Amino acid sequence: MCDQKIQIIGGGTFGLSTAYHLAKNGYTDITVIDREEVPSKFSAGYDLNKIIRPEYEDQFYTNLALDAISMWESDDFKPYYHKVGYVNCNSSKAPKKTLDVTDTFFNSLISNDKFPKGGVEKLTTEEDFKRVLPLDIDFKGWSGYYNRHAGYAHALKALQFVAKDCKRMGVKFVVDRIECMVYSSTKKCLGVMGESGEIYRADLTIMAMGAHISKVFPDLAVTPKAWSVGHLHLSEEEAAPLKDMPVFNCRDIGFCFEPDEDNNILKMCNSSAGWVNCEKTDISVPTESNDGVCEVDKEALDYQAKIFFPNVDKPVVDRKICWCCDRTNSDFVIDYHPDYTNLLLATADSGHGFKMLPIFGKWVLGRIQNNLSEEQSSRWKWFEDEKEIDDVSWRLGKVMNLSGEERF
């Protein structure tokens, strides 16, 4: 048992996973503070579904993702994991960048000893695609692969489970919006002050605010970015043929999931390098509202729906943006602030962090107990020197600024 007073700022994917693992490992005085009831709708994980896949450009994250998938298949998380497979591909018009990254992802699977043998196959012909996807698309000239050891999680339901289990283990939850950090004159973090005026004190403060971290630590080398999401509300007849469809990611167009089992809502995201929100400075900060998308993404989502589902005569609705905390090299940040030994950051999901929900908090625990591996400690340390926002190897396009843009 450990009675160290710990507070976690942010009750999204990383914050809840951290609370979950600390409580499981004997920490008895844990408080999660968020601006809304947890799970907060401002969390990137507050979503219909998220891709769960192990392929990466390097084996470091491939191995971690395989560990995460093992936990998704465990009794606790299995109800929220749909192992329908993952088609990662490119259209006949795809640029070299997306073709190359798809090949790299494929090779990360076939070269990994932990990945199930025979779990992935190349897709090179129209017949290959038609065999695994129930879609009326002209696949001539398309290429990619089908990964059977993947799928998606029902994101919101998974977060709700973790929050409920945290409460069962005694984790406390407070609703307040954080206004600022509170420091002593002796270089110690005393805690945070909320919008309510209350000062929340702790022995250890863990900042898991996702994209909102830039408001507090503008020098940290992360960039809040938003991606656009849209939905199709399908009828029973339209949804039935798509049941158990693999997650479908055409890297130069966008990705989508099977219709939701509860309401037949199908989620889509268009391919994009993302959006920043820089008004008077070069520091990106999340918008107050996530409703609506900019015109260029509205058109991209409409195009995606037309290509993917040509026989569905339904508009793309419930359009919104989803904010993530991005790093150029896509590494997480799990490290102490360089000036305060009792202030820890757990952030930089970089658009691929949700799949780590079952195990992310284990790494935060490892940082607290100083038993992360050398590579983990090195890759997840605090950085202040990354400035490039466009050069993310596995994304397509240029980052755009949505400040002043109308959203629809």
Image (cartoon, rainbow, N blue to C red):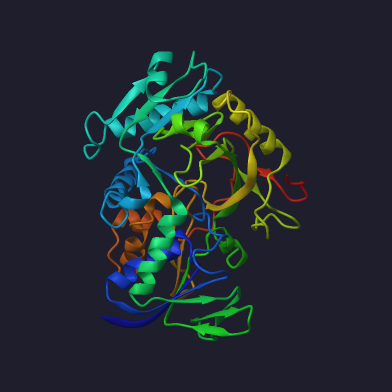
45 left or right of 294 in image: left
Q: Position of residue 131 (x, y in %)?
A: 37, 20
Q: Position of residue 257 (x, y in %)?
A: 47, 38
Residue 38 against residue 253 in the figure, above or below: below
| Residue 125 appearing in the image | no
Location of residue 304 by image quarter: top right
Residue 342 against residue 102 in the figure, above or below: below
Q: Position of residue 86 (x, y in %)?
A: 39, 34
User: Which residue: 26% across, 36% down?
Assistant: 112
Q: Depth check: give the residue in front, 383 or 150.
A: 150
Q: Depth check: give the residue in front, 144 or 87.
A: 87
User: Which residue: 76% across, 46% down?
Assistant: 405
User: Which residue: 39% across, 68% down?
Assistant: 164
396 left or right of 343 in image: right
Q: Quadrant of the C terminus?
A: top right
User: Which residue: 27% across, 71% down?
Assistant: 25
Q: Depth check: give the residue in front, 36 or 280.
A: 36
271 left or right of 208 in image: right
| Residue 356 appearing in the image | yes
Residue 114 against residue 40 in the figure, above or below: above
Q: Quadrant of the N terminus?
A: bottom left
Q: Depth check: give the residue in front, 335 or 263.
A: 263
Location of residue 165 by image quarter: bottom left
